[in-house]
Image (tube, helix red, strand yellow):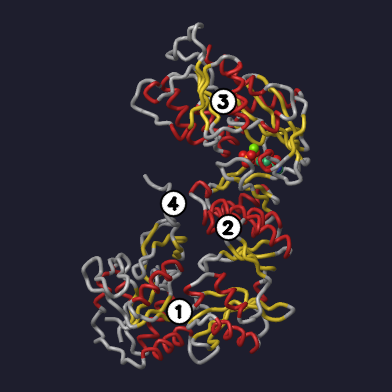
Amino acid sequence: MNVTCPECGAEWELSGVEQGEIVTCPDCGVDLEVLTTNPATVGLAPEEGEDWGE
Amino acid sequence: MTGMKPNGPTPRQSSRPVCLGVLVSYLRPEEKAILAAARDRGIDVAPVFDRDVVLDLAASDAPTSNLDFDVLLDRCVAHSRSGYVLRALQRWGIPTLNSADAVRLCDDKAENSLALESAGIPTPRTLVAFDVESAIRACEAVGYPAVLKPVTGSWGRLLARVNGPEQARSILEQKKELGSFHHAIFYVQEYIAKPDRDIRAYVIGDRVLAASYRTAKHWVTNAARGAESAPCPVTPDIEALALRACAAVGARLAGVDLIETQDGLAVIEVNTGGEFKGLMSTTDVDIAGAIVDEALDTARLGVT
Amino acid sequence: MATVGVLCARGRVEEKALMAALAEAGIVSALFPPTDEPLPVGPLFPMASGRSFPVPQIVVDRHPDRQIARAVLATCRALDVPGLCAGIAAAGDRLDVASALAAKGLPRPETALCTSENAGLAAVAAMGLPATVLPLDLKSQPIDLPDIDTAEAVLEHRSVLGGSEGSLGLVQAGTPPPENVVTIFVIDGVATALETSMAMGVSVEVLRLAEQTARALFADVIAVVIALTPSGPIVWDVRPVPEFRHAQALTELSVPQAIAQAVQHRLEPVSAPRLPSDSTPDWTNLVTQGTRRDLVISA
Ligand SMILES: Nc1ncnc2c1ncn2[C@@H]1O[C@H](COP(=O)(O)OP(=O)(O)O)[C@@H](O)[C@H]1O
Ligand SMILES: [Mg+2]
Ligand SMILES: [Zn+2]
């Protein structure tokens, strides 16, 4: 499944991912969230919040 | 929520005056009235400024932190600070009028609403969301106009009436862009078309001491925003609902905000640090004196 | 060493297209500056890291964060490196832009500078609703105020949560509907492309207004947002670093090609050094994010 980075337009093959997973664009390095898997689409990942952590 | 503390301080000796600590951020007219009422009663009273406090969490008693009072009254405007002080005092067995749990709960409007709902108390329908898009869906669910409030906040600050999805987006984006993470906890409430006023009922212990109408042209009727206070008779309805609301959140000293809906009274929130300057101007009841008397009882009984 | 530094946080669609257009014109470019490297201030001091600072011959401003862009552009100026940028809109904020346009008598909406929540409310009361808040920082989007409840809430939130920076802003009368708005990309004084959801065509008068705006701001590259009103076109806002992926070209050059040409014109006096196609400008090695190197397009 090919996806397109909304930031830089790079296209690459994504496999074995689930909706909600975070992947990194191999080209521009931006963090992306898998929005759908069939067809595969990605959008900008949410920004890290100050209250996030383990 | 109340009860004898098994390991609390031993009941004081009657020869020594009660030592009352009043935790403050600064002195408002309310605190001045409380200090005066305490001095009138021959009580050894001292304001404790939150900025001076150093809590020694390792200590097993209050003197290490200079908080060895017979009873402490929380009148801090910074509720997050008083939450820690009250929690430490609880460990050290110093009685307080409101518990740390009650103060923490009332400091958070979402917790406040959840406690009211859990107790079956009428309150406007409230939804909580964590993202702009889901918060807009929450606004649609309660219908427009909707009300947005910060979960932590007071004096009618940052309350917004939202008339449509685009308006919701404008306001939610500001919260997200400019505020700390607390402001991205979106508290969405049904708007109640109320008369141009709400009711502030003042609860001490198990009674409503007095109530006032707060009237304003603006839909936000906080005294801090310039609403006019006028006498309001404490009806059985007001009495019953305000007491139930306090019981629901575990508060023994509170200002309860009520609004008149088409289906009767509803509770907006319970404020453990309730101001009563406006109320004082509408009643002969000595609110400050009653608070001090309640503090004396608390010291005597060791209730916290 | 790259000839052109593309000042940005990350190579997005626009920056990649620009680098491709530069490569087509035989110009080596790379993303700039090296992200995690302290920058020298002026030529006297070496880099804090001890490495020599990779100075391009020219920097093209594509940074979405205007504060960072201003800082880096100033540093470049101190090193005698010119920047291709939006002029006053790159160095300043919306107030600087509005003032410069007003000084040149260019048509603009009724505007008030507000320094507090109450001033904002007074401006809205005087102008009527709808109105728009334009934060001074050009990075922040304009905020529509369709009604008084929204105006009160937005102005209060900006002042309580945003401090003095949030309280400061322009209030402009009206909120132009999208179908009456056209964004025109002006490069080296020429309206090169546009973006609009307007049904009708764009008049020459509107294109000329965009070009006059760019000139008044000394902008090499800028997008001018023009609103069509019953009394004629007005300059509503500007974008110092516009997205142009959906722009429709007005000339035979695309936006990135036109920017590449503008770069070329500025390089002409000095001959641009060419690198063999397999070499990477050495300063990109400083970039810890390895993916960025993919973006270096050599002639
Ligand atoms: N859902 C609502 N519908 C109508 N008016 C409301 C609503 N919520 C709050 N208000 C008005 O705004 C005032 C302040 O709201 P409140 O929740 O008590 O916030 P604060 O903690 O800032 O006092 C209330 O006293 C009431 O007049
Ligand atoms: Mg209230
Ligand atoms: Zn990418």
In the rendered image, residues at marks 4 and 1 fall on the same chain: no
**Residue most extreme to the left:** C50
Residue C64 appears at what percent x and percent y? 45, 69
Mark 2 or mark 1, which is nearer to you? 2
- What separation in Å lies between label 3 and label 4 (alpha carbons)? 32 Å
- Asked whether residue C117 is in view, the answer is yes
Return the chain for callout 2. Answer: C
How packed mark 2 is, by other alpha carbons closer than 10 Å (few <14, some 14-19, many 20 or more), is many
- What separation in Å lies between label 3 and label 2 (alpha carbons)? 39 Å
Residue C137 appears at what percent x and percent y? 52, 66
Tag shown at residue C85:
1
Q: Is residue C59 left or right of residue B138?
A: left
Tag shown at residue C221:
none
- Seen from the viewer's position, the closer of residues C170 and A51 is C170
Mark 3 or mark 2, which is nearer to you? 2
What amino acid does circle 1 point to?
Answer: Cys
Tag shown at residue C167:
2
- What separation in Å lies between label 2 and label 1 (alpha carbons)? 28 Å
Residue C139 appears at what percent x and percent y? 50, 67
Which residue is disc 3 drawn over? B250
